[in-house]
Amino acid sequence: MISIAGKILAELKIGDGDKSLVLQLGNLRYCHIIDDVGVLLPMFELSFLDVAGKSKDKVTIGDGTPFSATLGKAESAGNLREMKFNTFTVKEHKETPSGYEYKIMGLLTAPKFLKGQFTKSFKGDSSTVIGNIAKECNLQYKSLTSAPQDSQAWLSAGKAYGNFSHFVREHGWVNDKSCMHSAVALDYPSDTLIYVNLTEQVKTQPVATFCIIEPKSSTGPTFRILNYEVVNKGGMSNNLSGYGHQKIVEHMDGTAVVHNPVAATKMESSLNIDKSIKQDIPLVKREYSPIDCGNTNDKFTKAYHQNARLRATYSNYLTLVTNEFTGVKLYDVVQVTLPDQVQGGSSDGNSGKYMVNGKIRIITGSNYYERLKLISTGSNVDSGSDYVT
């Protein structure tokens, strides 16, 4: 085991059994364990220097080579989580005067979820179907949503399990304010496929507080921010799905339904959408769905339209770095308190509640960091933007 600053324990191992190569801090350049809702599976990136040439004797590093990372707090030494991956790409392998230098990357060991194509039908609501997909792929399943109202027969015609789970979530429906999402996450006792209603999740209490200067009051454990960056991607999101986005579906009897208005739930005081611009734009994008032949539930197309538009409202990004082992998970809600560097006190606009959208565990040299990608629907300063239609 590697001890990092006496607080974190880690073991990084390439290969299996007697032929495995255990990395030490002396030959490790960096290791990134990447958890993100925007990728199909968690990933790793690794760079190390093999001074003694043991990699040649112990293991051939190529497509599918096992890599495992065991990581956790030193105080939990007897209950650390082992994460198993397979190499996907050897980005660099060269001989240097110091030894063999490797840069490799790979994906969580869940090949069936990634590439397993199948033709099969599932009956039930979207949560039941995604739960069945998790079981088929040896993943645990966790639902963070109330019961969906979208039961039907769901047919996969040659899709991979992961892609089919995304298809189901995109058509998932709970009510006229639900916004469904899913991801495979590492921060559980075992690899877990999560299905979540973002609209419900944003209303949960923060599990932790992140700050630069410790606030007088906080929710959950407090972690110090080393640096941060705030980026607003509202313009791109609004142009894609925010302003005047229509979806039209025709029925067998010749009638058509136009889906346009969507009721958004604010995470903070305002949404990243300009009301005056919205009022000046009658239509930006019109899409036509396949003809409704009556073989799907009555919310199938409306759910797809609603989920896409409401996901677009999460366009305020805050990326922060801490040197502590936080234990926060994908889709957790956290509280962030940032300083106002000009007027003093806290920054009203950027402080507030955020949801965890991505997490990178970083080991470099003898240091440990976590880089969190957080999202919100808007700022904490009320601009009067309270809807998306």
Image (tube, rainbow, N blue to C red):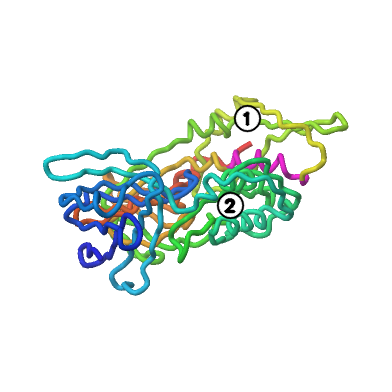
Labels 1 and 2 touching (C-beta < 8 A): no
Magenta stretch: give its range: 297-310
* Residue 122 point in image, percent of width and height: 71, 52
Packing grade of label 2 (10 A; few <14, some 14-19, many >=20) is some
Q: Is residue 121 visible?
A: yes
Q: Where residue 166 appears, x then y in whole percent? A: 59, 45
The numbered mark at residue 129 is none
Indicate the secondary structure of the residue bearing disc 2: helix
Q: Is residue 27 in the magenta section?
A: no
Query: Height in image: 280 above or below 192?
Result: above
What residue does disc 1 label? Answer: 244
Comes first in the chain, label 1 or label 2: 2
Up/down of 305 relative to 30, above or below: above
The mark total stands at 2
Q: Amino acid at mark 1?
A: Gly
**296 lies above or below 225:** above
Is 367 in front, or is 88?
A: 88
